């Protein structure tokens, strides 16, 4: 390989490595059995030396990793290293939860219930954020339509809002109040 080709290989490698870290943060269960990756996440130097030909990741020096990530990754090397740490924590948390949630014991069942309750709480928070965003968007669109001074735009906005609210109502929990903006 020529010396001109090496930098592009390392640039692609650092980009692929960052993508792998983001994937590990999002789906730690998919990476928890990868002992090489788990070991590489322990330090910056070990991660620089990590290799995965299938993912297009080649080993490099820590200086190369820092230099390229500073130029090619949003937030530079600090963001890259934060992704390394977040991936390490996500995988460790997943492994700890998996070990605790042995469903054959009373304690294992209790851990599983706690994990499911935690996941439900996260889902409720996400749902609430989406609800707030939808309501704000509806209010803003109505305001924009009214400020246009054109009755046809106001009417179209009203119809579009009704469609959105009907779709949104399909996901409302039974027995809860529905706050529809008309």
Image: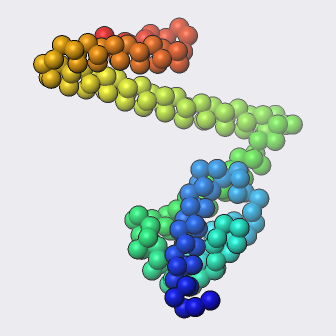
Is 29 on the left-hand or right-hand side of 69? right
Observer-nearest residue: 134 or 37? 134
Is 24 on the left-hand or right-hand side of 97? left
**Image height of 116 relative to 52, above or below:** above
Instruction: Give the residue displayed 44% in from the left and 10% down from the top.
Output: 177
Q: Position of residue 176 (x, y in %)?
A: 49, 11
User: In which quadrant of the rendered image does the N terminus lie?
Assistant: bottom right
Instruction: Give the residue displayed 76% in from the left and 41% down from the top.
Output: 101
Residue lying at the far front in this picture: please name it: 152
User: In which quadrant of the rendered image does the C terminus lie?
Assistant: top left
Residue lying at the far bottom in this picture: please name it: 3
Evaluate whether residue 167 shows in this view. Answer: yes
**Image height of 180 relative to 121, above or below:** above
How many dots with numbers? 0
Instruction: Give the residue displayed 37% in from the left and 30% down from the top.
Output: 133
Q: Position of residue 33 (x, y in %)?
A: 77, 59
Instruction: Give the residue displayed 37% in from the left and 13% down from the top.
Output: 162
* Residue 44 quadrant: bottom right
Q: Position of residue 20 (x, y in %)?
A: 61, 61
Evaluate whether residue 85 shows in this view. Answer: no
* Residue 48 quadrant: bottom right
């Amino acid at each position: 390989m020529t010396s001109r080709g090496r930098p592009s290989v390392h640039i692609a490698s650092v980009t692929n490595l960052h993508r792998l870290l983001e994937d590990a943060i999002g789906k730690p269960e998919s990476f928890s059995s990868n002992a090489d990756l788990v070991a590489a996440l322990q330090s910056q130097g070990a991660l620089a030396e990590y290799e995965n030909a299938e993912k297009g990741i080649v080993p490099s020096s820590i200086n190369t990793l820092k230099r390229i990530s500073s130029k090619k990754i949003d937030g530079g090397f600090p963001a890259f290293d934060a992704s390394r740490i977040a991936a390490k924590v996500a995988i460790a948390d997943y492994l700890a939860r998996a070990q605790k949630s042995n469903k054959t014991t009373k304690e294992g069942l209790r851990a599983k219930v706690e994990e499911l309750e935690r996941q439900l709480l996260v889902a409720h928070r996400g749902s609430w954020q989406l609800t707030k965003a939808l309501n704000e968007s509806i209010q803003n669109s109505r305001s924009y339509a009214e400020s246009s001074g054109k009755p046809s735009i106001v009417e179209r906005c009203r119809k579009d809002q009704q469609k959105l609210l009907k779709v949104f109502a399909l996901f409302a929990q039974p027995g809860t109040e529905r706050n529809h903006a008309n």
